[in-house]
Amino acid sequence: MRILEAFSHSPLLIVYICSGDPSPQATPDLVRRLARAGADIIELGLPHSDPIADGPTIQAAAQRAIAAGMNTDVYFDVASVAGDAVPLIFMGYYNMVYARGLDRFAKDCEDSGISGMIVPDLPPEEAAPLKEACVRHGVDLIFLAAPNTPPARLKMICEETSGFLYLVARKGVTGARSDVLQDTRDLIARVPGGVPKAVGFGISTPEQAADVIRAGADAVIVGSACVDLIAKGEIERLERLVKDMKEAIARAKGKAPIVC
Amino acid sequence: MKFGRYGGLFVPETLVQPLLELAGAYEQMKNSDEFHRELKNLLKNFAGRPTPLYYARNLSRELGRKIYLKREDLVHGGAHKLNNTLGQGLVAKRMGKTRLIAETGAGQHGVATAIVGANLGFETQIYMGEVDIERQKMNVYRMQLMGAEVIPVRSGSRTLKDAINEAMRDWASTFEHTHYLLGTAAGAHPFPSMVRDFQSVIGEEARRQISEAEGRLPDSIVACVGGGSNAMGIFAPFLKDRVRLLAVEAGGRGPGKTDKIADNGASLGYGTDGVLHGALTKILQDPYGQILESYSVAAGLDYPGVGPELAYLAETGRVHPRMADDKAAIRGFRALSRFEGIIPALESAHAIGYAMSEPEALGELTIINVSGRGDKDLATVMEYENS
């Protein structure tokens, strides 16, 4: 519910960080600073040993976080401490969820103030058991659609997703890219009305973020660009990037025609 | 498609459609006489099938029972892997793909993919862990000779599992013109069924050959298991028969594990339910679901997962998971070389080593699948014996 409420104030900036990078202790403070800088929702990644949907930047962050002692128990402690300035969303791979037990995982999300879950390697066809657990604990299960998702499947995913629909901007894995593709615009346009749309994968600059909002998205997700700055220890630059992105999408929305 | 609760399609959305398209194309080709004619022709005239089912006289005498060897080591390229790469190569051709990517551990699947790439005219790139590149230099050079590019994988444990991760990441952006030629009966649907089908030629031949030679089916069949393609290949045509199916995993250095490393590759023996590379199966993992690094002296068995169909068949009791550790494998390697003049791959040597350590489990008449030849392993064995 908290996520849908947030979307009533779109355009939103959603920021992904890898929990535990550079250390579990550092994560709650990062969350608060990002929220102050303008992030509307934080995607808190749980690092996995085998992140098949992620490019080198987030792979490296996951390895650092695991080495720094991040695990699922610590993850929920960190989330609880991070506070409730903005809604938090879990992002992580299905085996981590499965290993803990689906109901227990959803309950831990509820108890630690996490409003939604994104599980990139769990398509709706395989998600029924987790969906049940999420419904029981009032946690949104957010599904992804990609440029190569055909129309009938896109419709099914729109019906299954809750909170919002995560649009994968491009083929391939996560990681900063320099352009916004026609594929992305086409995908945004293909989503039926009424479903909140957040676009991620490859968005790293305020200009790209503004493009995506102008193309009709309700939110922009930025990940690798932020993870990269955290890796370099450049937290002030990170805050400035978030601020700039937030301003850029607000301006873009002002100029944009009303969509769905 | 699932095997009980195992299997499935646990992949990022971008890969769902390419996998469904592959499954659809494969279903069509399964029913195409022309496809089967073309594949049969290549298997016979290029790969050298059928392979002999050889009565191992000396090993039989040693173990006090009749032992036949299915000689997949004689397939072109030196292992059973070509059965699958030829099949998938033809599927990819018909789907209009121009590039093949594959993962490889020991290098055998990479070589078999490079062969098909050269022969059928694909651009070919092979992902291989840095650690494996180091221990399988000859196979790297073989791949390169046949025009394939070998891409070193530096992420994670730098072995087979990471090579699969990297190939999946590649495929997520190249699927339009690229076929991911997975080498084992694991991963997301349709790979487990498709690879099993292409490898079933091993079991179909063996069934005919043992019936001709002995007038009956064997009491047991022994095969080594990494992901499980040679095992599923020889087991599949016998699933409905009263034949004991013994799946020998890598016992490695033993059952021990640390936070990050399992000392073995025995996912059926020591693993628990989990999702790896697109399928729910038995995997080696820590309590939080982080995948452990596996270990085996045989690079081709050094994998922390197993095909979902084998996980299912092991659970129902149809397949019996067994183990041979490094020592038993080296013993099998030496024994087959010495008794029969056949140097088996270190992977296959696990099956031999197991048979030697538990001969009473084999019954009176058994078939051991010699999935590959051991030339690639000479340096590894020499090093093992000196350490």
Image (cartoon, coloured by chain):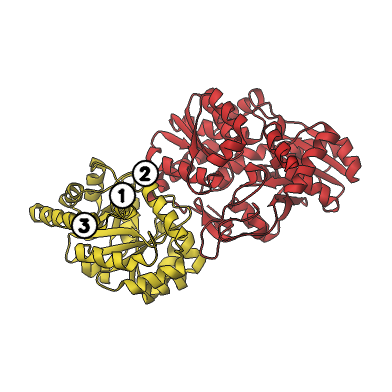
Chain colours: A yellow, B red
Q: CA distance from mark 3 to mark 2?
A: 24 Å
Q: Is residue B210 left or right of residue A229?
A: right
Name the residue beneath numbered marker 3.
A242
Q: Are marks 1 and 2 in contact (CB under 8 Å)?
A: yes
Q: Is residue A193 left or right of residue A165?
A: left
Badge 1 element: loop
Badge 2 element: loop
- Residue A242, x across and y down, in percent: 21, 57
**Which amino acid, by three-letter code, is at mark 2?**
Gly
Quarter of the image where one finds residue B212: top right
Q: Residue at x 31, y 49 (%)?
A: A201
Which marked residue is nearer to the observer: mark 3 or mark 2? Answer: 3
**Which amino acid, by three-letter code, is at mark 1?**
Phe
Numbered label tally: 3
Which mark is first along the chain, 1 or 3?
A: 1
Name the residue beneath numbered marker 1.
A201
Tell me the number on the disc at residue A172. 2
